[in-house]
Amino acid sequence: MLNIEKQIENESWVLKLTGEIDASNSVELDAAMSQVVENGAKIILIDCSGLEYISSAGLGVFMSYLEEFEENNIKMAIYALKEKVFQVFHILGLDQLITIKHTKEEALEG
């Protein structure tokens, strides 16, 4: 099960992910990302403090936005990943493509 809370803090959109992202619910993450982009987000922070698991489908959602974000000068940072979830990003080399920070403050700094 996946829960996504969206909120605006200053000029940043924060998506708080709780639970697990897998093939059955990655479309929910995609819809949430698409919605904040349509709402004009320029800074998107992904709070993963409550994320227990991410599958390749979930990773694919993040990857699918990288080019669009770069073209439209949208900054995205993921923060507060649990070690086992971070390892999934790291093993696939995604920590080289996606900004991953420990805290929200670090994520805001870029």
Image: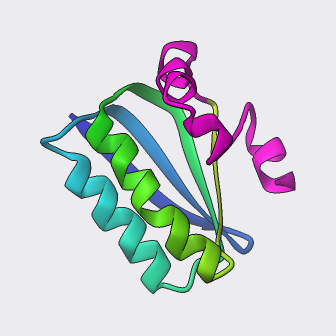
The residue shown at (56%, 38%) is 94
Task: Depth check: give the residue in front, 101 or 6.
Answer: 101
The image shows a total of numbered marks equal to 0
Residues rendered magenta in the picture: 81-110
Tell me, yes or no, whether the highlighted magenta stretch contains residue 108.
yes
Residue found farthest to the top: 84
Residue 81 picture quarter: top right
Task: Depth check: give the residue in front, 16 or 92.
Answer: 92
The residue shown at (53%, 69%) is 67
The residue shown at (33%, 42%) is 58
Residue found farthest to the right: 109
The residue shown at (63%, 72%) is 70
Residue found farthest to the left: 24
Task: Tell me which secondary structure the magenta stretch mostly adopts.
Answer: helix
What percent of the width, then of the height, locates residue 24? 12, 42
Q: Quarter of the image for the N terminus: give it.
A: top left
What percent of the width, then of the height, locates residue 30? 31, 61
In the image, is 42 to the left or to the right of 106? left
Using the image, determine if residue 39 lies above or below residue 3. Answer: below
In the image, is 71 to the left or to the right of 5? right
In the image, is 99 to the left or to the right of 44? right
Using the image, determine if residue 74 lies above or below residue 25. Answer: below
Tell me, yes or no, whether the highlighted magenta stretch contains residue 109.
yes
Colour mapping used in the image: rainbow
Q: Quarter of the image for the C terminus: give it.
A: bottom right
What percent of the width, then of the height, locates residue 108? 80, 55
What percent of the width, then of the height, locates residue 84? 49, 13
In the image, is 90 to the left or to the right of 18? right
